[in-house]
Amino acid sequence: MGRGDSAKPIGGEVPLKIRIGFVVELARRLHEYGTAAPRLEDVVNLVSARLSLGCNVLSTPTSIVMSFADHAASDDDLADVTQVVRLPPGEVNLKALCRTDEIANGVIAGEIGLAEGRRLLREVGAMRPRWPSKLATVASYGIAAAAVAIILHAGWNEAAASGLIGLLIGLVALAALRWPSLGPASEAISAFLAATVATVIAAWVAPLAVRSVVIASLIVLMPGMTLTTAVRELSTQHLISGTARTMGAVATLLKLTFGAIVAVQFCELLGLHPQQFEPVLLAPWIEWCAVIAGALSFAVLFRSPLRHVPIVVGAVVLGYACTQVAGRVSPAFGTFAGSVAVGAVSNLFARVTDRPGALIREPGIILLVPGSVGFRTLSFVFENDAQLGLHTAIALITLLVAIVAGLLFGDLLVPPRRKL
């Protein structure tokens, strides 16, 4: 949403219901594709004003409430219509987000009619991944897990085990789409599966750093991005959405941690004990190859448009490279520097190309978000190591603040001209 932001209102002659229908459908699509509350509300307010509507909107992770007043008929701000939309939490879908942005820009520019725009938005919402896309997603779970294992400075055994377990978790995620009743328990099942398989491999096949394998295997399920979005919403005074999103992330971490702890105790019951392992140091160039492989897998998981895959990969590499260079001072400063770079470059990209900055912003911080730190925090608490749990909790908060502050500073360096 960038083109025509300051143009005069349009659509006043169109019936109120059609104008409201378009705005509601647009809000539904943006929510579904993972847009945070501040950006979603800004876009809804912008589009409503262009359509001669006054709108008060409240977005939360599971609902949107919108009250509309028809400014084409009267200057009265009292609402004519209030719409409540109940939705599941959204997931990042860059391809659908770009298409939604194109449709909204076309409507604002007068190139697409409101009724036609609403129909096109519904078509975007009706799109479902086909089997080749589903299989690519499952493969991406395995590639991302293996890549993150190497980034965590594990060895080849850990990378292979993480990749295998990642594939299994991808199949669990696919099954959860097929059978929705499996969805609420999928995180716990995945964590149980990851810890059990890792322990079996470490006991019977090859020595492993089991904890690193479990974290790498579950990396796609870690709610680091959700926690980061929640803190940013809280920092911009979107308190309801930020609080709700935080609790959703905590619930996910609890399920992941509980599943892993149960698996460890189950393996102890069966007498399975991991072999002692020797740390293996891999060459630095292998780590960078893993970063690129992980970036490609995240491009698939974020459903990036094919023509924008190089941009997504470059964003991941940019964020990680800045973190590694500035991280020589401290991990928190490295995370801050990476976030500043990603935030500024995403805004610059949006200004130059008139495309959503989310194409760079979302993948750019994926290797910076501290989901694994939150997992370790709760793991230590469940293991009755409160002191170490408190230490990692402080590290988690520090990293979250560093990411959010970095993105805000990036907005100051290159002010965003677009809402997405």
Image (spheres, grey):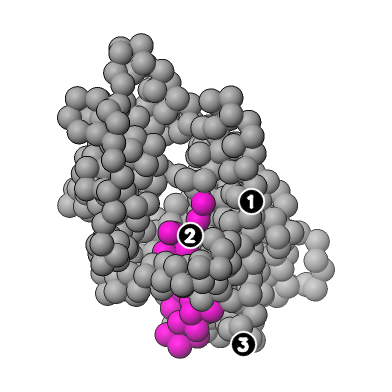
Residue 305 vs residue 373, the one in the foreground: 373
As shown in the figure, which amino acid type bears the numbered disc 3?
Ala
Q: Main secondary structure of the magenta part?
A: helix
Label ID, residue 70: none
Question: Within the magenta stretch, is there residue 47?
Answer: no
Q: Secondary structure at mark 1?
A: helix
Label ID, residue 7: 3
Label ID, residue 397: 1
Whole-percent x, y for residue 406 in the image: 60, 69
Residue 114 vs residue 222, the one in the foreground: 222
Q: Is residue 332 above or below residue 395?
A: below
Residue 190 vs residue 392, the one in the foreground: 392
Marks 3 and 1 sit apart, C-alpha to C-alpha, by: 41 Å
Residue 378: which quarter of the image?
A: top right
Q: Earlier in the sequence, mark 3 or mark 2?
A: 3
Q: Is residue 20 visible to the viewer in this orientation of the structure?
A: no
Answer yes or no: do the residues labelled 3 and 2 have beta carbons within 8 Å?
A: no
Specify start and end residues of the magenta stretch as a single range.
343-370
Whole-percent x, y for residue 311 in the image: 34, 75
Marks 1 and 2 sit apart, C-alpha to C-alpha, by: 13 Å
Left or right: residue 236 compared with residue 246: right
As shown in the figure, which amino acid type bears the numbered disc 1?
Ile
